[in-house]
Amino acid sequence: MQPDLNQMMRQAAKMQKEMEKMQEELNTTPVEGSAGGGAVKVTCTGAMDFTAIKLSPEAVDPADIETLEDLILTAIKDASNKAKELAQIKMGKSLGGLKLPPGLGF
């Protein structure tokens, strides 16, 4: 029995619309990463477009720039990881259990 080409095309179009909706949600959903107990906060979108860095005054010590650099890097990594998790969650909902070939997972 051959697959129904029209049905496959409708499913592909539906999936494309869902993927576009998911991408728009990722582009507009803010994600915050932090370090040092909130002394450094980094904000990005779910699509990892970084939009803000907030430093508390106690995080800024001119005699210890290395610690501040480490805190910023840690906050960026935290925000990136949260954005990736958000994308995976949204992708999973969008694909609805669709089995992808190896190497095409998100």
Image: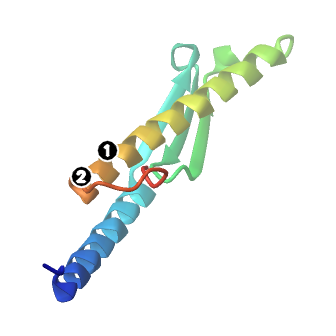
Q: Residue furthest top?
A: 63
Most foreground residue, 86 or 71 = 86
Q: Position of residue 68 (x, y in %)?
A: 73, 20
At horizontal 65% and vertical 14% (from top left) the residue drawn is: 58
Which residue is identified by label 1? 89
Q: Which mark is residue 53?
A: none
Pointers 2 and 1 in contact (CB under 8 A)?
yes
Residue at image point 17% right, 81% down: 2
- Taking the image as shown, residue 6 lies to the left or right of residue 104, namely left
- 80 or 44: which is nearer to us? 80
Q: In this view, which residue lies farthest toward the right? A: 63
The vertical placement of 88 against 20, above or below, is above
Dot 2 falls on a residue whose secondary structure is helix
> Within the image, what quadrant is residue 69 found in?
top right
| Extreme-left residue of the structure | 1
Residue at horizontal 33 percent and vertical 74 percent from the top = 16
Q: Nearer the viewer, residue 10 or 17?
A: 10
* Residue type, numbered disc 1: Ile
Please name the residue shown 29% across and 49% down the image.
92
Picture colour scheme: rainbow
34 to 105, vertically: above or below: above
Residue 97 left/right relative to 28: left
Which residue matches tag 2? 93
Q: Amino acid at mark 2?
A: Lys
